[in-house]
Amino acid sequence: MRSNCIIWALWTYAARLRAWVRDGMPEQREPYLMVRPSRFRPRWVPHVLVAQWDSTFGLRVHSYKPINGREVPWYLAWTRLLFRGREEEGDWPDTVAEL
């Protein structure tokens, strides 16, 4: 699928919010949107994630990450607006280089 983390996060958040309301809005189960700087350059590009509290596991974070992520100069950031990616649980970097 070709998308970006912002579109994916808003779509997923809306779906989880509808499910939460449909289930009667149980306490500590509401979905959250989280924003942090991208680990890829340029750093001013936001990365948006979806989280949901789970009484067993705590805060479960899901993010949409690029399959072939690589750093680009700031003037080429527009070329990465849409990318092939995958949903992953957690927000840990794939490699130490992403830190």
Image: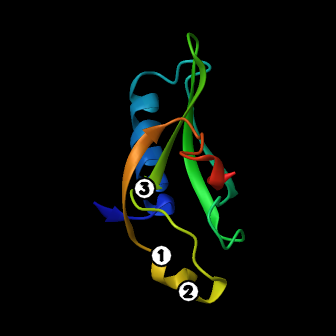
Q: Are marks 1 and 3 in contact (CB under 8 Å)?
A: no
Q: Say which of 3 and 13 sits in front.
A: 3
Q: Is residue 71 left or right of residue 2?
A: right
Q: Position of residue 39 (x, y in %)?
A: 65, 58
Q: Mark 2: which amino acid?
A: Leu
Residue located 46% across and 21% down the image = 24
Q: Position of residue 1 (x, y in %)?
A: 27, 60
Q: Say which of 67 and 3 sits in front.
A: 67
Classify 11 as above or below 21: below
Q: Regarding mark 2 in the picture, which secondary structure is present there? A: helix
- Colour scheme: rainbow
Q: Regarding mark 1 in the picture, which secondary structure is present there? A: helix
Q: Where does label 2 land, which residue?
A: 76
Query: Which callout, 3 or 2, points at the residue further toward the start of the chain?
Result: 3
Which residue occupies the extreme bottom position in the image?
75
Cα distance, mark 1 to mark 3? 15 Å
The nearer-to-camera label among 1 and 3 is 1
The nearer-to-camera label among 3 and 2 is 2
Q: Regarding mark 3 in the picture, which secondary structure is present there? A: helix
User: In which image quadrant can residue 97 be found?
Assistant: bottom right
Residue located 51% across and 24% down the image = 25
Numbered-mark total: 3
Q: Position of residue 6 (x, y in %)?
A: 51, 61
Q: Where does label 3 land, which residue?
A: 8
Q: Where does label 1 land, which residue?
A: 80
Q: Residues within 10 Å of mark 1 (few under 14, many from 20)?
A: some
Q: Are marks 1 and 2 in contact (CB under 8 Å)?
A: yes
Q: Position of residue 72 (x, y in %)?
A: 57, 77
Q: Mark 3: which amino acid?
A: Trp
Residue located 41% across and 22% down the image = 23
Q: Is residue 2 left or right of residue 41?
A: left
Cα distance, mark 1 to mark 2? 8 Å
